[in-house]
Amino acid sequence: MKSKILSILLFFVITLGVTAQEDYKDKKNLKETYVNLEKHQVFKLPVEVIPPGTKPRNIILMIADGMGTTQLFAAYTANGGALNITNLPYSGFSTTQSADNYITDSAAGGTALSSGQRTYNGAIAVDMDRKPITTILEIAERNGKATGLVSSSAITHATPASFIAHNISRNNYEEIAADFLKTDIDIFIGGGKSFFEERKDGRNLLDELREKNYLVLDSIRQAPGISKAPMAILTAQKHNPAYPERGNLVQEGTEKAIKVLSQQEKGYFLMVEGSQVDWGGHENNTAYIIKEMLDFDKAVGKALELAAVDGETLIIVTADHETGGMSIESGDFEKGKIRAMYTTTNHTGIMVPVFAVGPGAEHFTGVMKNTDIFYKMLNLFGFDK
């Protein structure tokens, strides 16, 4: 009897540990109306004609997790009818279904974007047979390009993980963290420090990173003048707080990553994720969604400011799926006011927007599958899978 009780308690503890990283999905914090009092300026793109057929030297893929057209237009309204995202000259839509479900999760959605292959929900860059699939980050690295990841969640969370790790389950955070050591990624920024140093297997991956000559930091601001790779900046033990509590992490992380990766002569691939638009959707929290969207848009503006002007960088902005079934009931551009309603606290199956600027941007128009984005990036880099 005692052994049975202990088994039940052990199962509960293990389950609690796994679900703690996903508990944002269980909240219901309905805040339907939001008024934005701090509008930000958008970056004015230079008028520059890039000849058709020009190939990018660098690609920055920016993913607003959970962003559908409603989240985008809510932020557009809240910011007075202007966003950096909507200034990008080319646009289209992406379908998001996974291989085993009409409604994708972030792991399968991220894997489709990173590898060009749809898989089961929960999979991290493995196929339906649970075999590893090579990702665009790994292919870029194999071809001599610098690589980077930035996320406002734990860096081991589903979307960033799907670019660098291979695992049968998105919940295996410690195994996912260990996969970082199997690559030579030049810079990664995000939370999740505990999965690198407080591990069941006793390994301290931070020490192992240092042995590989990584500069390991807790904050971007610890290295204001350093642009030398490799660099690991782990900004929280688990997830980072919501915006604005976490500060300008996504914007500053984008800037730091671009400055570090730009030192590489052969160019780079960078993925930046605004994770918590999704979390606001799970909560049906309009204020949370819009604040996260505006924070992400500032990061897009920083990428445009630093990279779009060089004529060598393709910037793609999209989402892995929509969250919340959000709709706009009323709005006011002048007041920056939005009233929204929701149909679910989960993901939905609707198409998500795709925006692009830079060499090759003209390929990101019309309706495409999420897997097409991978192949377009691969072909524009001129690489084989």
Image: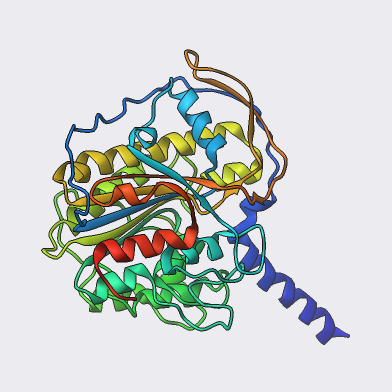
Rendered residue at 58%/42% (across/down) = 280
Up-down relation of residue 60 to residue 296 (above or below): below
Q: Quadrant of the C terminus?
A: bottom left
Rendered residue at 70%/42% (across/down) = 28
Asked whether the viewer can see residue 22, the reply is yes
**Residue 181 pos. (x, y %):** 34, 77
Looking at the picture, tell me which residue is in the foreground, 241 or 150. Answer: 150
Asked whether the viewer can see residue 193, the reply is no
Looking at the picture, tell me which residue is in the foreground, 124 or 190. Answer: 124
Q: Quadrant of the N terminus?
A: bottom right
Q: Residue furthest front?
A: 52
To which quarter of the image does residue 140 belong?
A: bottom left
**Residue 192 pos. (x, y %):** 45, 62
Give the colour scheme of this rendering. rainbow
Q: Residue furthest right?
A: 1
Rendered residue at 23%/50% (across/down) = 359
**Residue 139 pos. (x, y %):** 30, 73
Rendered residue at 66%/41% (across/down) = 325
Up-down relation of residue 31 to residue 215 (above or below): above
**Residue 112 pos. (x, y %):** 49, 65
Instruction: Please count the marks in the image.
Output: 0
In the image, taking residue 192 as reference, residue 288 lies left or right, namely right
Q: Residue furthest top?
A: 334
